[in-house]
C-alpha cells in the first residue's frame, strides 16, 4: 500500500520535513499500526510520535481515531492539537 504523509506545526519542525511518500508493509493496516511503524524509526520519530503524545490525525481530510483503517493512496495528516484564544 502506498500512502502520502503530511506533518504539521511543531511535529513538522521536530521531524524536519512536512511530507513524505511511503510504501507500507502488508501488516500495517490501521493508523495505530502506522504510528508504531514510524516510532520504530527511532530518534526524533520515537520522541515526536510517542504513545503519550496527543496527536490529531486525518485520512483524506477526514478526522479519524487510531483504529481507522488505511487505504491505498490515502493522504494521512498528523498534527498536534491546536489551541486558540
Image: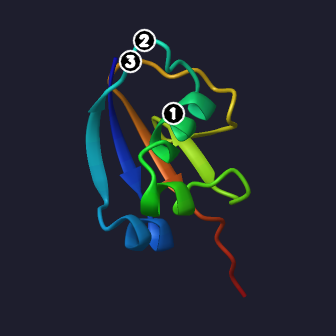
Among numbered discs 2 and 1, the one appearing first in the sequence: 2
Judged from this view, the residue extending furthest toward the bottom is 85
Does residue 22 sit above or below 53 in this rendering?
A: above
Left/right placement of residue 29 relative to residue 60 reads right
Q: From mark 3 to mark 2, how far is it between C-alphas?
A: 4 Å
Task: Please give the name of the residue rendered at 48% of the width and 35% of the height, measured from the top-left corner.
Answer: 37
Task: Please give the name of the residue rendered at 46% of the width and 71% of the height, measured from the top-left corner.
Answer: 9
Q: From mark 2 to mark 1, how far is it between C-alphas?
A: 11 Å
Quadrant of the rendered image containing residue 12: bottom left
Residue identifier under label 3: 25
Between 75 and 33, the residue placed more toward the observer is: 33
Question: Whole-percent x and y of residue 54?
Answer: 70, 59
Residue identifier under label 1: 34
Residue identifier under label 2: 26
Q: Residues within 10 Å of mark 1 (few under 14, many from 20)?
A: some
Question: Whole-percent x and y of residue 57?
Answer: 58, 46
Task: Please give the name of the residue rendered at 57% of the width and 29% of the height, measured from the top-left corner.
Answer: 33
Does residue 73 sit above or below 31 in this rendering?
A: above
Q: Residues within 10 Å of mark 3 (few under 14, many from 20)?
A: few
As helix, strand or loop, the secondary structure at mark 2 comes to: loop
Quadrant of the rendered image containing residue 24: top left
As helix, strand or loop, the secondary structure at mark 1 comes to: helix
Between 17 and 47, the residue placed more toward the observer is: 47
Residues under numbered marks 3 and 2 in contact, where contact means CB atoms less than 8 Å apart: yes
Task: Please give the name of the residue rendered at 73% of the width and 57% of the height, measured from the top-left corner.
Answer: 52
Judged from this view, the residue extending furthest toward the top is 26
Amino acid at each position: 500500500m502506498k500512502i502520502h504523509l503530511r506533518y504539521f506545526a511543531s511535529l513538522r519542525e521536530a521531524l524536519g520535513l512536512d511530507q513524505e511518500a511511503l510504501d507500507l508493509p502488508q501488516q500495517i493496516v490501521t493508523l495505530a499500526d502506522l504510528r508504531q511503524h514510524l516510532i520504530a524509526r527511532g530518534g526524533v520519530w520515537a520522541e515526536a510520535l510517542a504513545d503519550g503524545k496527543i496527536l490529531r490525525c486525518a485520512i483524506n481530510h477526514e478526522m479519524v481515531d487510531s483504529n481507522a483503517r488505511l487505504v491505498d493512496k490515502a493522504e494521512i495528516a498528523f498534527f498536534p492539537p491546536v489551541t486558540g484564544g
